[in-house]
Image (tube, grey):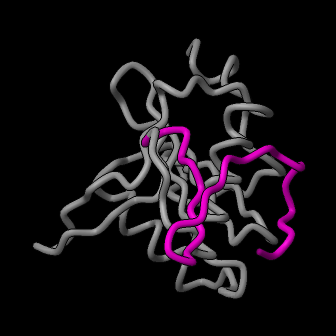
Amino acid sequence: MVVLNFSNYSFRYRTEKGKAYIFCLSRKKFLRLSPEEWVRQHVLHYLITEKKYPLVAIKTEFLLLFNGLKKRADVVIYRREKPLILIECKAPHIPLTKKVLEQISRYNFQLNCPYLMLTNGIQHVFCQIDETNQRLCFLETLPEAPNLLRA
């Protein structure tokens, strides 16, 4: 797999019938190792290790109903049962375009998270929703858990 723009984390792997699998911390099982899953697992380690979010606050592959269609949000972080951060993971070869930002924005109409993160593992985009002025404010990084979970 491609080297991503994250710290070097330790993962659990296994191979079955010639196919690679990676252990998912949140789902507590081995999942087929695809480029997008590689990014998603790095995001989980980043959130837990560097941003100090507790695993119990993190949901992966969260089901959304959007215009009658089933969609899945890659990662959602909760604070007291309320969605706080929505994260969209793309494979490293997928550029983070305006179209990807529009996708996460559509998903967020249902969740109403005040923070968004887009990543392809190489590039990361962090946003905060400014509801007063109805715009996105781009951030350098996500706030750490102690700063957001106490609020």
At horizontal 84% and vertical 51% (from top left) the residue drawn is 140
Is residue 125 depicted above or below 60 in this figure?
below
Q: Quadrant of the N terminus?
A: bottom right
- Badge count: 0
Residue furthest to the top in view is: 150
Q: Quadrant of the C terminus?
A: top right
Q: Which residues are magenta?
A: 1-27
At horizontal 54% and vertical 63% (from top left) the residue drawn is 88
Is residue 5 depicted above or below 53 in this figure?
below
Q: Is residue 73 left or right of residue 117?
A: left
The image quarter in which residue 15 lies: bottom right
Q: Residue 3: x percent and y percent?
A: 86, 69
The image quarter in which residue 82 lies: top left
Is residue 93 depicted above or below 29 in this figure?
below
Question: Which residue is more in the foreground, 37 or 108?
Answer: 37
At horizontal 71% and vertical 25% (from top left) the residue drawn is 52
Q: Residue 55: x percent and y percent?
A: 54, 28
Q: Residue 30: x percent and y percent?
A: 49, 52
Is residue 48 depicted above or below 20 in this figure?
above
Residue furthest to the left in view is: 68
Residue furthest to the front in view is: 17
Q: Is residue 18 magenta?
A: yes
- Dominant SS type (magenta): loop
Question: Which residue is more in the foreground, 116 or 11?
Answer: 11
